[in-house]
Image: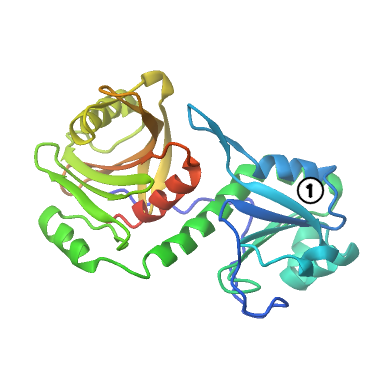
Amino acid sequence: MMRKAVPFLVIVILFLTNSCSEHGTFPPAGSYSQVLLITETGKIEGFTEDMVKELEHVIDYYNKNELQFYVKVISIYDLNKEQPAKNMVFLGLPRQGKLGEYINTFIGPAGVRSVLEGKLNVFKKLNYPIPGQLSVIVTASSPEYLDKVIKEQGAFIRNLIEEANRERLRDYLLKKEDTYQEKRLKSKYGFTVRMPQLYRVNQEREDVPGVEIVRIKPHRGLTVSWKYWEKKGVSLADSNELYKVRADLAWKMYDKDVMRRDLVKFSVDHLGTYEAVRMDGYWENSQDVYGGPFICFFIYDEFKSRLWVVDCVVFAPGFKKHPLLRELLSIAETFRI
């Protein structure tokens, strides 16, 4: 089995925890799709405007575009007037103004030196300043360099926030866990997925083969399937064959769903601890007029010469798709062979 490699990061993240807070013990409010962006002035100009653009990244869900995050910009002077948000990004320069004082306290003298030397620019604390809250510092030695950091590392910063979102969401969902079904699936099929009680096993198909778990209203489903794979590994070079694998899965498992090749893209990614080929696309039903987005992961099991398929599918007319896919991914990341 391929395992996730530890990548080299130009940006270093500090993972720290702290429970002290000026807000007391109230839990963070709002959606995981919301980001509170704190600057010195609260004005949307210069590097602040660029940070807003990076965070409000547009995701193409084929029949409708969605923003990855919705950003509210405030001044550091107004922070105590806000309800604690799930995601906060502090954007500014160390040693400058009230925000600079906050940054200095947050990252400490060693962190400030690293910023001024051009070594570190992004710092992260989860469960800070209160449990369940994420605080991210984006800083640099000068306004010009900070603008460069934002433009070059915008995707990295968004992914950092998303990973923390999925971690907290997963912890919440698994407070009530269906361990009986987990043990049964492991014994019968040789894989595990941690299963919230909000989900149920919808179908088990020997002809596919595959197992689908779902949560409805709106519908979000996760299917695990598998097949013999004669190649030694899986890569982007296998994209045409992988497309056919999922096409067969969708036709059998999802009542004759189909895909359009022009609406599918492949990338190298990871799922939990495993390296994977990721497939993003849009599904449609061949018998009726409806569809939705999907994200599918292909993982190679070298010990069994098996290709595992972990498929995340949303059908949610009138609902935003990104939060639902975020939830599915938080569960899919618990997949283990």
- Name the colour scheme: rainbow
Q: Name the residue at 85% across, 65% down.
A: 77
Q: Quadrant of residue 264?
A: top left
Outermost residue on the right side: it is 97
Classify mark 1: residues with Cα within 10 Å, few (<14), some (14-19) or many (20+).
many
Percent coordinates x, y for residue 5 in the rendering: 42, 51
How many marks can you see?
1
Q: Is residue 139 left or right of residue 169?
A: right
Q: Could you tell whether 327 is left or right of 90 in the image?
A: left
Residue shown at 31%/45% (left/top)?
Answer: 221
Quarter of the image that includes the C terminus:
bottom left
Q: Is residue 91 shown to the viewer in this render?
A: no
Q: Between 217 and 229, which is closer to the camera in this rendering?
A: 217
User: Could you tell me residue 54's position as x and y percent?
Assistant: 67, 41
Residue sitting nearer the eye, 155 or 247? 247
**Rendering coords of residue 257 (x, y %):** 27, 28
Q: Is residue 218 above or below residue 336?
A: above
Q: 275 or 226, which is in the foreground?
A: 226
Residue 171, by quadrant, is bottom left
Give the residue number, with chain letter if any, for mark 1: 146
Is residue 325 toward the left or the right of residue 49 in the image?
Answer: left
Q: Amino acid at mark 1?
A: Leu
Closer to the camera, 2 or 211?
A: 211
- Splitting the image into 4 quarters, where does residue 279 fall? top left
At x 38%, y 46%, the residue is 218
| Residue 282 seen anywhere in this rendered image of the structure | yes
User: Relative to 153, does residue 75 appear above or below in the rendering?
Assistant: below
Residue 282 pos. (x, y %):
39, 29
Q: Residue at x 32, y 60 (%)?
A: 198
Tag 1 secondary structure: helix
